[in-house]
Image (cartoon, rainbow, N blue to C red):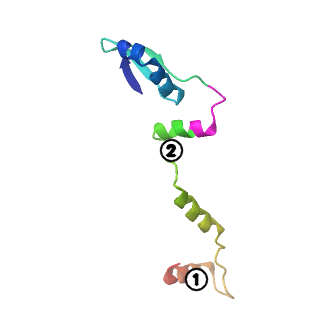
């Protein structure tokens, strides 16, 4: 949430509206007393990228890096370990840990 004076609001209205467009709420003060609030409307036509930007600016989301996504896909694509003969899943897990996979 951003706080600005009436003078700053008049002088920088376009920039402040750009903050609001991206999900920020603006409090307007007069002699350090809050008198008005500018907040985004509930626009249903906001793109998913803008929604992600809003969540990111609020600190609720951190976008992953492409390397992380590639590594995650590699992990998901791995086949689960299969037990051999009469061995159990526990034995397979212990063996996998011992091999350092």
Residue receiving disc 2: 61
Q: CA distance from mark 2 to mark 1?
A: 39 Å
| Residue 86 locus on image (x, y percent) | 67, 87
Question: Is residue 84 shown above or below 11?
Answer: below
Question: Is residue 51 shown above or below 4?
Answer: below
User: Which residue is rendered at x = 55% and y = 80% of the image?
Assistant: 96
User: Which is in the foreground here, disc 2 or disc 1?
Assistant: 2
Give the mark nearer the N terminus: 2 vs 1.
Answer: 2
Q: Which residues are magenta?
A: 43-51
Q: Is residue 96 left or right of residue 12?
A: right
Please rate how many residues cluster around mark 2, counting C-alpha atoms within 10 Å: few if below 14, some from 14 to 19, many from 20.
few
Regarding mark 2 in the picture, which secondary structure is present there?
loop
User: Which residue is rendered at x = 53% and y = 78% of the image?
Assistant: 101
Residue placed furthest toward the left: 31
In the depicted view, which residue is nearer to us: 24 or 94? 24
In the depicted view, which residue is nearer to us: 30 or 17? 17
In the depicted view, which residue is nearer to us: 31 or 47? 47
Quarter of the image with the N terminus in it: top left
Task: Examine the structure image and report whether residue 88 is included in the region drawn in magenta.
Answer: no
Regarding mark 1 in the picture, which secondary structure is present there?
helix
Residue receiving disc 1: 91
Question: Is residue 90 shown above or below 50?
Answer: below
Q: Is residue 16 left or right of residue 72?
A: left
Please rate how many residues cluster around mark 1, counting C-alpha atoms within 10 Å: few if below 14, some from 14 to 19, many from 20.
few
Q: Is residue 76 left or right of residue 34?
A: right
User: Which residue is rendered at x = 40% and y = 26% of the image?
Assistant: 2
Question: Is residue 19 shown above or below 95?
Answer: above
Residue placed furthest toward the bottom: 85
Number of dots carrying numbers: 2
Kindly check if marks 2 and 1 are in contact, taking CB atoms under 8 A apart as contact: no
């Amino acid at each position: 949430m951003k706080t600005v004076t009436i003078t700053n609001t008049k002088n920088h209205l376009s920039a402040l509206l750009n903050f609001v467009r991206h999900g920020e709420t603006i409090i307007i003060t007069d002699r350090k007393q809050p008198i008005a609030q500018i907040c985004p409307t509930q626009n249903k036509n906001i793109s998913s990228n803008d929604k992600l930007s809003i969540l990111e600016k609020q600190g609720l989301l951190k976008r992953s890096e492409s390397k992380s996504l590639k590594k995650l896909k590699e992990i998901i694509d791995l086949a689960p370990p299969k037990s051999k003969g009469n061995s159990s899943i526990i034995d397979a897990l212990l063996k996998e840990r011992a091999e350092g996979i």
